[in-house]
Amino acid sequence: MEGISVRPKLNVLKLISIFSGVLLLVPIIYLLYYGYGPFLVVKDAFGKLLISSIEFTFFSAAVSVISMVLAFTPLAYFLARHSNPIIESIVDIPASIPHPLVGIALVFIDSPITPLGKFLYDHGIIFYYSYLGVFLALIIVSSPIYIRAMQNFFKSLPLEPEIYAISFGYSEFYVFRKIALRKGIGGIVSAGLTSVARAISEFGSIVIIAPYVTGWIFNGDCTSSIYIYNEFQTYFNASVSAAATLIVFSLILIVSIRIINYVLEKRNMI
C-alpha cells in the first residue's frame, strides 16, 4: 500500500555471528597490543631463539604434512568410496584424546623395556628428544584433519569417470592414481595447508616426546609453543611479546591459506 514504509527486519543471526567472531578476536588483539605495547621486550619479541623456534616449527609442520600426504591420501580415498565405521573411528581417535597421551605413547613405544622399543633402540631409531619424535607426534595429532578433509574432497568428485574406468577392468588403485589423484591436487594443497596450521599449534604431545631436539640444523631448539611456555615460566612479559610475534607469523600463514584456497576455487580445483 502507498504511504506505508516497511522497516527492514533486524538480522539477529548476523548480530550474534559478529559478536561471536569478536569474542574469538579479543584474546588475539590483547596479545598483540600488550606484546608490542606495554609489555614489549624487544630482545624476546624478535630474538634469535624465538625466530629459530618458529623456523623449526614451520619446518616440522611442513615435513609432517608431506608425510601425511604420502601416507594417508590413499586412506582418505578409500574411506570416501567405502564407508567403514571401524577405520573412521580409528582415524578420529587422535583428535578425541588429550594430546599428552600421544607423547606418552611414543615414549613407551620407543622404550627399551618393550620388545618393539628394544628393537628400535638397538637400530638407532630414537623418538625421545629427536626430530623423528616431533614429526611422528605432529603426524598423529594432525592426520585426522587431513584425512577427513581429503575424504570430503574425494566424495565431491564425480564418480562417472571412475565407474567407467572400473568397467574396463582397471583396479581401484589404478583409478585412484590415474583419475582421483590427478583431480585431487587442489584438495591436497588445501587440506595440507590446513593441517600445517594445526601442526604449528601443537604443544601437548611434543612437550613430552621432544621438548627440544639434538643434532642437525636446529640443534637445541624447541618448537615455538614450547619456547613461549618456557618463557612464561621464567618471565611473563617476555612470553607475551614472543606470543605476539608468533601470532603475526600465524596470521601470515592464515592469509596465505585463504589466498591459495581462493585461487584454487577460481580454477575449480577444490
Image (cartoon, grey):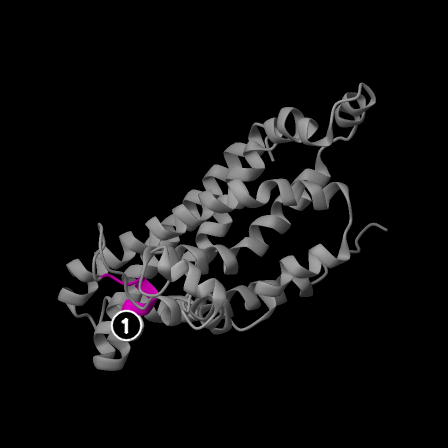
Pick the quarter of the image with the C terminus.
Answer: top right
- Residue 258 drawn in magenta: no
Query: Closest to the observer: 191 or 219?
Result: 219
The magenta-colored residue range is: 221-227
Left/right of residue 11 with respect to residue 127 in the rendered view = right
Judge whether 119 appears above or below 148 on screen.
below
Judge whether 100 appears above or below 164 on screen.
below
**One can see residue 72 in this view:** yes
Q: Residue at x 47, y 45 (%)?
A: 67
Q: Quadrant of residue 118?
A: bottom left
Residue 120 position in % (x across, y down)? 41, 59
Three-letter code for the amino acid on which mark 1 is drawn: Val
- Residue 222 drawn in magenta: yes
Q: Residue at x 36, y 59 (%)?
A: 122
**One can see residue 46 in this view:** no
Q: Which residue in the protein does label 1 denote?
A: 240
